[in-house]
Amino acid sequence: MATPMTADQWLAALRAEGVTDIVEMPGWRTHNRNGRGAWGDVHATMVHHTAGEGSGLADYCYRGNADLPGPVCHDFLARSGRLYLVGNGRTNHAGKVARNAYDVVLNERSVHPAPGPDELDGNAVSYGLEVENSGAEGRAWPAKQYDVAVRVQAARCRFHGWSADSIWAHKEATRRKPLDPRIDMNAFRRAVAERLKHPPSWNPGQTTPPLEENDVPLTDAEMNKIADLAAAKTWATAWKSPTDPEGPTRSAATFVRWADSRHQRVMTQLAALTAAVEALTKLVGEDVDTDQVVAAVQAAIRDAVIKVDVDINGTPAA
Ligand SMILES: [Zn+2]
């Protein structure tokens, strides 16, 4: 349920939706059948084919004929994908429609039953897009034309806050037009629904929003690779020695290896010193000469250094 959009609103909505090849037919902004019947509120937007092809179709849509005065639609979409703005207001595109068909679009239901008898004034409640196509079996809509048709109907739905289920085909609205148009309308509505999930500037095949890429989890292999690179970078960090600020810079790994070897030397010297003190303590008060003292201390240091060497180097390296 909605107030029909103005001409300016319609143009802006089309351009926002990426419809750029637009021809404004002279007088289209006030070209309508408003004096011949109701117009609005609007509840739906209809898809038609022209059941013929040729260069005169835009003019035909504007003027109509003696039996069906124009405008006979709001917009005419040529096979090239060019969109002609034909009318604004009530137009002669739908005629009478079935009540059950109208109820489907009014309530935005997705299942379209076979239309019942014509009862309602479809021109009062629905926009209408005419798409140039002969209607012959197997006569496809070119990809560009189809894409523009999807954009046109998405623009109307987006403006009014409708879902794609506000779109109906003439063949879904009346028994009089069983092939109008031949396209799969459910697929068409799905294409419009997909558009409506994205901003109007979206193009099919384009991923939005790109933020979702951040949510992709890393595999274990990727995590291990990152961890290995981080570790390698950490150990390669260049440092100056805190006790030798004027000396060369060395990697963190070199410092660790140097500290490990220095630690072993210190432990060996400590063991030797401890053994020497213990040997001297045992000799206190004994009647021994200097040579005996030196021999006893050297023997104690030798045993201790061998022992500390076994303790350190016999321990499996981590
Ligand atoms: Zn039709």
Image: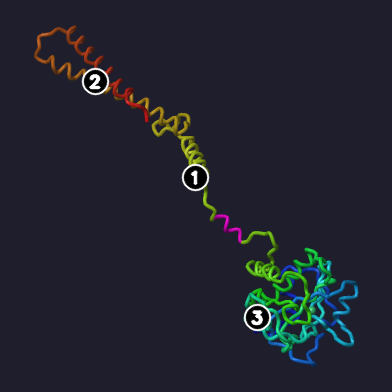
Query: Which residue is label 2 attached to?
Result: 273
Report how far apart the C-alphas of labels 2 and 3 lie in the structure: 100 Å
Q: Please provide the residue range marked out in magenta.
A: 209-214
Residue 97 percent across, percent down from the top left: 73, 85
Query: Which residue is label 3 attached to?
Result: 104
Q: Would you say the beta carbon of the disc 3 residue lies within 8 angstroms of ligand 1?
A: no
Q: Camera-side residue: 193 or 237? A: 193
Q: Which amino acid does label 2 sit on?
A: Leu
Q: Specify whether residue 213 is painted magenta.
A: yes
Q: Residue 280 carries which label?
A: none
Location of the N terminus by quadrant is bottom right
Q: Camera-side residue: 63 or 118? A: 118
**Secondary structure under the numbered disc 2 in the rendered image:** helix
The answer to which quarter of the image holds residue 240 is top left
Location of the C terminus by quadrant is top left
Q: Can residue 74 be seen in this view?
A: no
Q: In which quarter of the image is ligand 1?
A: bottom right
**Secondary structure under the numbered disc 1 in the rendered image:** helix
Q: Which mark is residue 220?
A: 1
Q: Do the residues labelled 2 and 3 touch (CB within 8 Å)?
A: no
| Relative side of 84 to 218, left or right | right
